[in-house]
Amino acid sequence: MHNTSDFKQPDLLFETSWEVCNKIGGIYTVLSTKARELKKSLGDNLIFIGPDVWSENNPSPTFLERKTLLKSAASALNLPENLSIRVGRWDIPGSPIVVLVKFQALMGHLDGVYGEMWEKFGVDSLHAYGDYEEGCAFAVATAMVIQALTRHLNAEEKNVVAHFNEWTTGMGLLYLKAHSPKIATIFTTHATSIGRSICGNGKPLYEYFEHYNGDQMARELNMESKHSLEKAAAHNADCFTTVSDVTARECTQLLDITPQVVTPNGFEPDFLPGKRIYDRQRKAGRERLLKVASLLTGETYTDDTFIIATSGRNEYRNKGLDLYIDSMMELGDKIADTGRKALALILVPAWVKEPSGALVMDLEHGGTDRPDCSFLTHRLNNEDYDSICCRLRQLEAERRSDNVKIIFIPCYLDGHDGIVDISYYDLLPALDLTVFASYYEPWGYTPLESVAFGVPTVTTDKAGFGQWVLSNFPNSLTQSGAFVTPRTDSNYSASADIIASCSAQYMKLPAAETKKAREAAAATARKADWQFFIKDYDKAFDIAITNAAKRNK
């Protein structure tokens, strides 16, 4: 167990995020993998709070309701505004207590809160649109639940810490500061809303970085409400943290505040299968992927096919999906002399309509009906406009390479997608290499997950994980299981060539060397175990409790 004796620890810790029991992106992985390590020191004084966005027809797959927990809080709390909660356990390592908040009653009744937020903290909700109201309703409802639970558990005179993640929970932090100032608060930004927006709008983030002003860019990009809320939460938190040195620099420039603590994201080894299961998953995953590829393309893919993949959030430029596709095309030229084929997968969720009907029939009945699209396993609602589809269609027309085939699997790999039907973690062992060519990546869970599963990865120095690798390990697939390539605003072509060359060199290695690389990858991941990173949270708790005590004097 890590040593917390030098730091003030919470007597009660609430941690809230839109992704508690609600898998959308990387924050789910952060919270679900660190829970067990936090629980070692806090026990059931660790309480996660998430949105109750579920129904009887669509229940949360990871929420186990337990009505008597927290002194039967689900029935005992007298919550305002017709709010309600369900209490249970989160079905992850550590099984922490979780509270799901039915916050929808607050939607449409936030005008008074918005007024208070403007008056006290300068939060500009006037220009809000999209998911702003929903995020704020959940955040404020969460704050009300934290207040009520603190009273219900007789913890009002104890060290209570409330940890809020991302701008979507920021208004809850400000509401607590205004109405329950004794509760210490932590705010973590995993990526600034304005930094992500600058990149997503195709603007060069890095060459002009020191000339960007966050407030000015928020006005230009119509991001004023989210940015002002995030900035206010960062400035008013008792402790402000972020997940990497990359994002800390971004916060300093765009939010006008430097985080007091950097809290890198770790991984929980319990998510990893044992060797026998791993070998079985690798065999089954490869058989399924090669079968799907053969039916989709009409070509034969033998067992020595090199399977390479990228995955993550569907942000075409930010996540480097554009660079991945182009580097895979270059890979074709570099492996022409090997006689082997490479299968390059894009495992990125998009606006899925349905599984490809012809592909389903072929998989179920052994038919040979060629699907309409040879690179797409599921039909999309917006195929004519989807950036990935447009680029792959263009490349197909050019017939760039015969020995590298790119296949887009555009769904959440939950094991029930209708085509692959294997969950993402169970599919990872089937891969030979992963590539995450990120342009904007505050941390980078996907490359960390890859090496944790013994799959070497290529990533960039614009990812927090990439910088962590460069600071701690040899930059080599065979020595650390990870290779980090530089990315700038002007080296796109050079990066594509480096990624293609690195992938080709790895593909040509003898089996003994690739085995060594897979072992090195797993060893690197072990250094990112939460037991090593949780100490940074101990610092954050100490700072928050200390600052709250000063503030309340």
Image: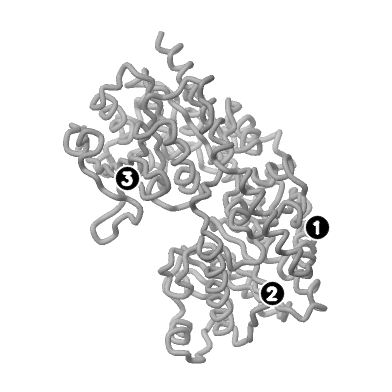
In 3D space, how far apart are the residues under numbered discs 1 and 3 (Cα atoms)? Answer: 49 Å
Q: Indicate the position of residue 6 as horizontal and vertical percent values.
A: 53, 19
Sequence-wise first label, 1 or 3: 3
Name the residue that disc number 3 marks: 89
**Residue drawn where x is 56% and y is 73% of the image:** 283
- Above or below for 537 versus 342: above
Q: In this view, does 478 lie above or below 355?
A: above
- Is residue 232 visible in the rendered image? The answer is yes
Q: Residue type at mark 1? A: Ala
Q: Is mark 1 on a helix, strand or loop?
A: helix
Looking at numbered disc 2 in the image, what kind of residue is underneath it?
Ala
Q: Which of marks 1 and 3 is in front?
A: 3
Q: Give the Cα separation between the discs numbered 3 and 2.
A: 43 Å
Marks 3 and 2 in Cβ contact (< 8 Å): no
Quarter of image, res 552: top left
Q: Mark 2 points at which residue?
A: 342
Which residue occupies the foreground of this view, 113 or 362?
362
Residue at figure coordinates x 32%, y 45% from the top left: 89
Within 10 Å of disc 3 (Cα), the crowding (few <14, some 14-19, many 20+) is: many
Dot 2: few (<14), some (14–19), or many (≥20) neighbours within 10 Å? many
Which is nearer the N-term, disc 3 or disc 2?
3
Q: Residue tagged by mark 1? A: 494
**Residue placed most toward the observer, 109 or 50:** 50
Rendered residue at 51%/47% (across/down): 268
